[in-house]
Amino acid sequence: MKIAVIGCGWLGLPLAKRLMDLGHEVHGSTTRDAYLSFLADSGIQGFLYDGISHDQLSEKVKESEVAILNFPPSRSADYAAQVRDIIAQFTTKTKLIFTSSTGVYQDLDGPCTELSPIIATHPVFLAEEAVRFSARQFTILRLAGLISEDRNPVKYLAGKQNTDGQKVVNLVHREDVIATILTVLKQEVWQETFNVCYPAHPTRAAYYVEQAEKRQMLPPSFTFSVDAGKEIDPFKMVQDLKFAYSHSI
């Protein structure tokens, strides 16, 4: 297939490489001119997209069979409008995969499924709605906190005070996110919304102390509330896609 990856950064670049290895024609966006040659060296057909401007896609990119929307809301004053704008540049036959966030859920205690209460004004949820009402086939993936071997939130919490140690963590490895996207494409799963989160949920205290020790870092200090916080439930995806997480958090 011809696939456009909008946002070839920390997640999008290894995803684009994996798609290319599987024989797909991959077009990947970057915000920097200097990065185009790097994408070309990786075999990816690069193009510029800054996340805020209009009509930046070439005719070749617009004809992609699948567009993976993986650019952050941080650059745009109106993320939903920007998502609508870029979707409108693709053909009506282009299928969409949108990388959303579990941050769209209200912060309520207990298991959090795809049907749990949403923050209706959250900019990422409003962008989800732009995808849903685009008159195209789509799948929305609500990603938990993203980690990899070289990226873990303990680096930002090391030595900090008053972290709530009672709340549970909701994390997923980058490789499992990539595997999820490849599964959606292979199985042709559309008109769905899935949580993407590793199914184990240790407390922050247990998890961050362990991770700090592994990295020989000073762990955060903890307070302990009575609330465990929301626990993202990935069961729908595991059941519907027969998906197995393979990278422990």
Image (cartoon, rainbow, N blue to C red):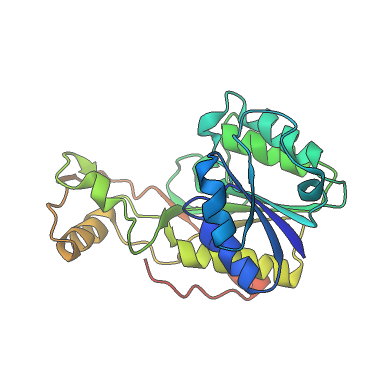
The location of residue 112, given as percent across then percent down, is 52, 52
At 53% across and 39% down in the image, what residue appears? 32
Please tell me how many numbered marks the rendered image carries.
0
Q: Residue at the spot x=61%, y=63% of the render?
A: 43
Task: Report x, y in % for residue 86.
Answer: 73, 37
Residue 206 location (% of width, % of height): 23, 60
- Judged left or right of residue 190, residue 14 is left
- Which is nearer the eye, 75 or 79? 75
Side of 244 where 151 appears, left or right: left
Q: Is residue 190 above or below residue 103?
A: below
98 vs 32, nearest the viewer:
32
Compared to residue 10, the image places residue 71 above or below, namely above
Instruction: Report the residue at 62% width, 38% height from top.
Output: 125
Task: Tell me where residue 225 sits by quadrant.
Answer: top left
Residue 36 in view, yes or no: yes
The quadrant the N terminus occupies is bottom right
Q: Position of residue 129 (x, y in %)?
A: 71, 38
Q: Is residue 59 left or right of residue 21?
A: right
Question: Nearest the camera: 121 or 38?
Answer: 38
Residue 202 falls left or right of residue 108: left
Residue that extends furthest to the right in the rendered view of this protein? 92
Any part of residue 235 in sight: no
Along the viewing direction, whichever of 155 and 3 lies nearer the viewer? 3
Q: Quadrant of residue 54?
A: top right
Residue at image coords 56%, 32%:
122
The answer to whether residue 246 is above or below residue 145 is below
Q: Quadrant of the C terminus?
A: bottom left
